[in-house]
C-alpha cells in the first residue's frame, strides 16, 4: 500500500476549484471519482489509493421566500430522513 503523508493546506466546498488547483499542480485533491471522471479518462488527473477516515459535510439550502415544488419537497424530505437515520 502507498503511504502518503499529507498536510491539509486549504479546504473548499467548490469541486471546480479543487479540480483546477490540482490540475495546476498545486497539490492533491480529495474528490469523489464521479466528479473527476472526465479528467481521469483523459489522463489529466490520476487516482491514488487513499484509505483514511475523514468526515464529509453536506449541506442543503433552500431560499426561504421561494416556492418549493412537490418533487423538491420530496427530495428535501428524503435527505432529512436519510440524515436522521444515519445519526442513529
Image (cartoon, helix red, strand yellow):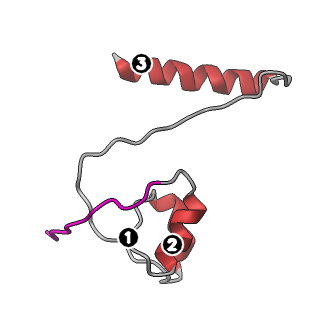
Neighbor class of circle 3 (other Cα within 10 Å; few <14, some 14-19, many 20+) is few
Q: Could you say which is closer to the camera, residue 28 or residue 84?
A: 28
Q: Is residue 52 positioned above or below 36 on the image?
A: above
Disc 2 target residue: 21
Residue 64 location (% of width, % of height): 77, 22
> Can you see residue 28?
yes
Residue sitting at the far front = 9
Q: Relative to residue 78, is residue 84 drawn left or right?
A: left
Q: Which residue is mark 3?
A: 85
Q: Compared to 63, does 41 lie above or below? A: below
Q: Residue at x 85, y 25 (%)?
A: 66
x then y, percent, for residue 62: 72, 28
Q: Nearer the viewer, residue 17 or 73?
A: 17
Tell which circle, 1 or 2, labels the residue nearer the N-terminal end. 2
Point 75% across, 26% down: residue: 71
Tell me residue 17's x, y (percent): 57, 64
Residue position marked by numbered label 1 in the rendering: 28
* Spot occupied by residue 70 in the image (x, y as percentages of width and height): 79, 21
The reply to whether residue 40 is visible in this rendering is no
Amino acid at each position: 500500500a502507498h503511504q502518503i503523508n499529507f498536510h491539509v493546506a486549504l479546504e473548499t466546498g467548490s469541486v471546480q476549484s479543487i479540480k483546477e488547483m490540482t490540475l495546476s499542480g498545486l497539490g492533491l485533491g480529495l474528490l469523489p471519482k464521479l466528479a473527476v471522471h472526465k479528467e481521469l479518462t483523459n489522463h489529466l488527473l490520476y487516482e491514488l489509493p487513499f484509505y483514511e477516515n475523514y468526515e464529509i459535510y453536506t449541506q442543503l439550502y433552500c431560499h426561504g421566500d421561494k416556492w418549493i415544488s412537490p418533487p423538491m419537497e420530496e427530495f428535501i424530505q428524503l435527505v432529512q430522513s436519510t440524515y436522521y437515520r444515519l445519526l442513529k
